[in-house]
């Protein structure tokens, strides 16, 4: 007999704990790309930065990243089972998290660069 309520609770607990790590891991690449691009674009000029614009753009990126993260539940309920020897529970979750995190970090790097460029071109 399968206990689907227990399976759902375990899956949600697993992925929501990883969401914290996911969000924390996206901060360094986005800020690094933002600071590096800002330094290149404003080289020799006095920057006229608007923090409100930057915070709103970064907030939208955080919202988008968490919406994308929520799609992991589709995979969880397609492949997941409540059997402890399941390959999904043993290897699938970790593999999907690692690959998704690497992809999200690449997008965060691109997003930080784009935010700096938008801020620069918005000023000019």
Image: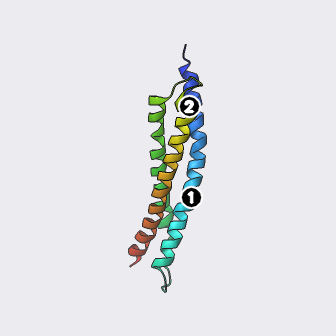
Residue that appears at 52% across and 72% down: 36
Give the SS element for disc 1.
helix
Give the SS element for disc 2.
helix
**Mark 2, residue position:** 89
Which quadrant does the C terminus fall into? bottom left
Q: Is residue 49 visible?
A: no
**Mark 1, residue position:** 27
In the displayed structure image, the side of residue 28 where residue 66 appears, left or right: left
Q: Position of residue 120 (x, y in %)?
A: 42, 75
- Tell which residue pokes out farthest to the top in this image: 1
Residue 10 or residue 46, whichever sits in front: 10
Q: Is residue 8 visible?
A: yes
Residue that appears at 55% across and 13% down: 1
Residue that appears at 56% across and 18% down: 3
Q: Is residue 26 above or below residue 7?
A: below
In the image, which is nearer the foreground, mark 1 or mark 2?
2
Q: Is residue 5 above or below residue 54?
A: above
Q: Position of residue 31 (x, y in %)?
A: 54, 64
Q: Is residue 76 above or below residue 58?
A: above
Q: Are marks 1 and 2 in contact (CB under 8 Å)?
A: no
Residue that appears at 54% across and 17% down: 2
How far, Cα to Cα, is label 1 from label 2? Answer: 28 Å
User: What is the number of the mark on residue 72?
Assistant: none
């Amino acid at each position: 007999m399968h206990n689907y309520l227990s399976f759902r609770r375990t899956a949600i607990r697993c992925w929501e704990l990883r969401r914290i790590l996911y969000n924390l891991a996206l901060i360094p690449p986005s800020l690094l790309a933002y600071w590096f691009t800002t330094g290149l674009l404003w080289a020799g000029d006095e920057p006229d930065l608007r923090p409100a614009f930057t915070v709103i753009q970064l907030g939208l990126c955080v919202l988008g990243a968490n919406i994308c993260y929520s799609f992991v539940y589709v995979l969880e309920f397609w492949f997941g089972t409540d059997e402890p020897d399941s390959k999904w529970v043993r290897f699938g979750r970790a593999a999907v998290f690692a690959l998704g995190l690497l992809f999200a970090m690449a997008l965060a790097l691109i997003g930080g660069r784009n935010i700096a460029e938008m801020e620069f071109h918005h000023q000019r």
